Image (cartoon, rainbow, N blue to C red):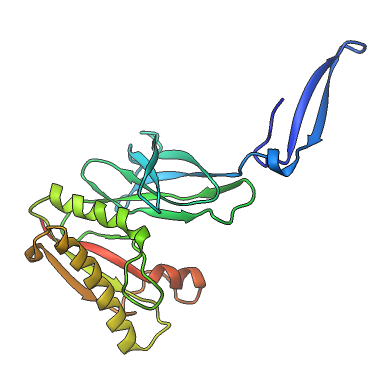
Amino acid sequence: YSVPASGEFAYFSSENNAVGKTDIFRILLPKEMRPEPVVLIRGKVLDATTKQPISAKIFYELLSDGKELGIATSNPKTGEYTIILPAGEKYGFLAQAKGYMSENQNIDLTKIKEYKEISQDLLLVPIKKGESVVLNNIFFSPSNSKLTHDSKPELERVRKFLVDNATIKVEIAGHTNNACSEDWCNKLSTARAKAVYDYLAGKGIQRSRLRYKGYGSSKPRWSNSTADGMRKNRRVEFTILEI
């Protein structure tokens, strides 16, 4: 007896003594008996600068409360990793390795109804002056600078990084896409960068180690000609100024 990833059918096998063979039966399962769909995420952990594979631990968590759900390990030779996440939640996942900063990812599986596979490489940024990471798991309410509850796990990771690296000074940079006027984009990106700055300062990080700035739409990383590019360009970045 087995249930495939789709969960729609169950398969049974039995030996047919009359002919000496095995018969396979397929039975449609009632909806309430079908397992919840899952999503398989696979990719490589890479050095963001050299693109070489890295041996790292991959942590995945619920965005709603930051609860850690599990840890995977990438292949030390190829950097390949695989994790499986149940549908119905929003998740964050990241790779960690000594000497690197993590560029975290997130995925919304609340509307997933069937098995799915996703490819996602994870980049690790060397801890060096001038290096930047995108804080992908910091979220704001639409068109304003109010941090949402789902941002807390990411904010706490940044705080811990600064506590663990007590001499590092950083810039918190806000960016937008080009779907607003230059003046509004500059104001919004500055306010969002300041919201992160205020959170960290409020958690005990010395203000002398922090700087914030809004760049509006002047520094896109992706093309604003696509919806995905515009979404990614609405971002907060973390840049090392001094070590």
**Residue at left 75%, top 41%?**
30
Q: Is residue 24 above or below residue 203?
A: above
Spot occupied by residue 56 in the image (x, y as percentages of width and height): 33, 38
Tell me, yes or no, if residue 174 can be seen here.
yes
Tell me what residue is drawn at x 12 percent, y 58 percent: 205
Residue in the foreground of this view, choosing between 76 and 4: 4
What percent of the width, then of the height, locates residue 97? 27, 41
Image quarter hosting the N terminus: top right
Residue depicted at 68% across the width and 35% down the height: 4
Q: Residue at x 16, y 53 (%)?
A: 162
Q: Is residue 59 left or right of residue 98?
A: right
Residue 198 point in image, percent of width and height? 19, 68
Q: Nearer the viewer, residue 13 or 132?
A: 13
Q: Is residue 44 left or right of residue 100?
A: right
Q: Is residue 238 above or below residue 8?
A: below
Q: Quadrant of residue 187?
A: bottom left
Kindly tell me whether residue 127 is visible in this rendering. Answer: no
Residue 186: horizontal and vertical position, in percent?
28, 83
Q: Residue furthest front?
A: 32
In this image, 100 relative to 105: left or right?
left
Number of marks drawn: 0
Closest to the observer, 16 or 68? 68
**Closer to the camera, 71 or 145?**
145
Question: In the displayed structure, does residue 1 sit left or right of residue 40?
Answer: right
Tell me the quarter of the image containing the C terminus: bottom left
Residue reaching furthest to the right: 18
